[in-house]
Amino acid sequence: MSEAKLRTVVFYEHYFSEFYLKQRQRVKDKIVWTLRIIETQRHIPTDYLKHIEGTHGLYEIRVHHAGDVFRIFCFFDEGKLVVLANGFQKKTRKTPADEIQRAIRIKRDYEQEKERENT
């Protein structure tokens, strides 16, 4: 029995899909499993979704598989829509600043595009 969706995950542009398509099948499966948790769980553990400090509304989805660590940046739109931005394989303890800046630019582009559509 599948759980009811509380949120909907969507891709914005090509950023996430380019990252996703480069992954091994087992990593893809773990990403999909993690996205289902985000869509269906009322309270998402920070092991899977965490706010990025110092940003306005940017989050990272955390995926661990066989000792590898992956991050997918995302943000919320109207509370129930989770918009996926860029993803990357994390190779150091600290999240690279250039990846965070890229996600901030993607979020800004999304918001500007949505604003244009609504005017």
Image (spheres, rainbow, N blue to C red):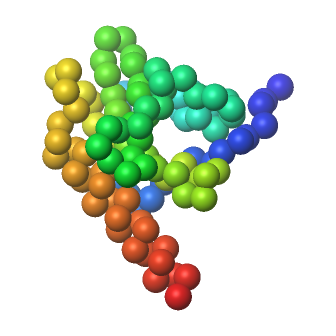
Left or right of residue 4, residue 94 in this image: left
User: What residue lies at 43% left-to-right and 68% top-to-bottom?
Assistant: 111
Above or below, 60 relative to 75: above
**Which of the 4 image quadrants contains residue 20?**
top left
In front: 70, or 109?
Answer: 109
In the rendered view, does 32 fall on the left or right side of 64? right
In the picture, the quarter occupied by the N terminus is top right
Q: Quadrant of residue 90?
A: top left
Asked which quadrant contains residue 87, the reply is top left
- Left or right of 114, for residue 3: right
Q: Nearer the viewer, residue 88 or 40?
A: 40
Among all residues in the image, which is located at the extreme bottom? Answer: 119
Picture coordinates of residue 116, whole percent (x, y): 46, 83
Evaluate whether residue 67 shows in this view: yes
Q: Position of 62 compared to 29: left or right?
A: left
111, above or below 116, in the image: above
Give me the residue at 66% from left, 45% from top: 7
Could one spot residue 86 in this view of the protein?
Answer: no
**Residue plotted at (17% across, 23% down):** 92
Where does residue 86 sit, x and y in percent of width and height?
33, 47
Residue with the most extreme front position? 54
Count of numbered circles on the image: 0
Q: Residue furthest right?
A: 1
Looking at the picture, how far across and down is residue 11, in whole percent?
Answer: 48, 54
